[in-house]
Amino acid sequence: MPESPQLQSTVNHLFRHQAGKVVAVLTHIFGSHNIELAEDVVQDTLLTALEQWKLKGIPNNPDGWLFIVAKNKALNLIKKQRHHILFGDDDTQILLQSGYTIETTFNKLAEEELIKDDQLRMMFACCHLEISEETQITLILKTLCGFSTAEIAKTLLTSEDTISKRLYRTKEFFRQQKVKLEIPSLGEIKNRTDAVLNSIYLIFNEGYNSTNSEELIRKDVIEEAVLLCKLLTQNIHTQLPEVYALMALMCFHSSRSDSRLTSAGDIILLPMQDRNKWNKKLIAKGNEYMNQAAFGNTISTYHIEATIAYEHCHAQSYDKTNWQKILEYYDWLYNISPSQITAMNRVVAILQLHGADVALKELEAISDKEKLETYYLYYSLLGEIHSQLYNRNTAQQYFEKAIGLTQSEAEKKMLQHKIAALLN
């Protein structure tokens, strides 16, 4: 039997994949105004698992065990508290108050085939248009990804107190506005899906290039983002071109994960990555999703970003990368969704095609550059350009500026290597 820390880690890993499902189902049953009760049941189930598995060992079907225990705890809670707490929504409140109909109603609401719909409803509730983007992400990480307050604070580079207050205010909003867990009407689904996809992509980016100072790549966060997006591909109302395009984009990016770090955790930049380590199955899966994304009249930013990512995956070597195509795609991307980050990434392609002099002029020509001045990659790119222009002192200054703007130890070490290379 594993020691307690190992057991804790095992249970946490298993439960993280179930927590979102369980919270979504129980919040649907309890009503969104009782979301904290749903989370309490989930936490109580985790503690029960730790106690019983320590004595009896981990069951053959731990996911099923966790879900059944959570459902039993939830049903007992409703039975005990139905006269003191209003459970359910307008359609189920009376049925959950009556001793004659509690179990039948509860079991119907907790049917296995409804779980995915409950998760989808919860995702759309988390991305309510009156909730800020940072709160949407916080709520998804908490309710659907099973992250603790401490983990969310670490992921989003803020304090636990800030996250706690953010969650409290949002739950108060749910209670006061009586937010229903439902997939929006067909007329609303486009706007709300945009918010959902944006939150999922931001979560994915945090996993792919974590702002966490200890880990650059967090595969657990990447996996959660992919699973959430996959739910959208499985529901007829959210099978939209941009949904499939985002899935393709995440597959293409994820395919390179195993080549991006050394065994010691040091960053391997794209030119030096071993392309034999790239996951060919994920690249093929990305192509499948891109084919599914090719319908209707929608060309989203995800379509173009996925196409850029595919160009990198398709190239047999770094030297054979089609930078001309990539530059054209960045031009297209900037035209439909102008941003300083896109403009900066476009300069990277220009650097490869036309050299450092042209790249520097293009970088200096970006409008509202002050928005990039807190972004370490901006100074890293300036350092690289000046390095190629043999302006070693200037390059070093920019690399040092970049070091001061990143929290990642791996990124700091990579930039220090760049400085060391200048001095040799």
Image (cartoon, rainbow, N blue to C red):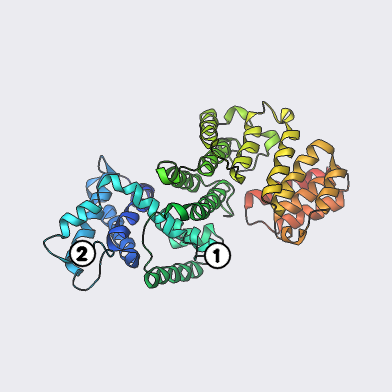
362 lies left or right of 58: right
Q: Which residue position is annotated with label 1?
A: 158
Query: Which quadrant is the N terminus positioned in?
Result: top left
Q: What amino acid type is highlighted by mark number 1?
A: Thr
Q: Is residue 124 above or below residue 332?
A: below
Q: Is residue 8 visible?
A: no
322 lies left or right of 61: right
In the rendered image, residue 153, in percent from the top left (x then y), is placed at: 51, 62
Picture residue at 25% right of the left edge, 53% below the top? 109
Q: Nearer the viewer, residue 412 or 285?
A: 285
Most distant residue in the left direction: 100
Q: Nearer the viewer, residue 117 or 282?
A: 117
Q: What amino acid type is highlighted by mark number 2?
A: Ile
In the rendered image, residue 72, in percent from the top left (x then y), is placed at: 20, 55
In the rendered image, residue 290, in percent from the top left (x then y), is placed at: 55, 34
Mark 2 crowd level (few <14, some 14–19, many ≥20, 10 Å Cα): many
Helix, strand or loop under label 2: helix
Alpha-carbon distance for marks 1 and 2?
36 Å
Q: Nearer the viewer, residue 31 or 413?
A: 31
Of labels 1 and 2, earlier in sequence is 2
Q: Is residue 129 visible?
A: yes
Helix, strand or loop under label 1: loop
| Label drawn at residue 78 | 2
Picture residue at 71% right of the left edge, 59% below the top? 404
Q: Is residue 241 above or below residue 83?
A: above
In the rendered image, residue 261, in percent from the top left (x then y), is placed at: 60, 40
Picture residue at 82% right of the left edge, 50% below the top? 395
Q: Is residue 395 above or below residue 271?
A: below
Query: Which quadrant is the C terminus positioned in?
Result: top right
Q: Nearer the viewer, mark 1 or mark 2?
A: 2
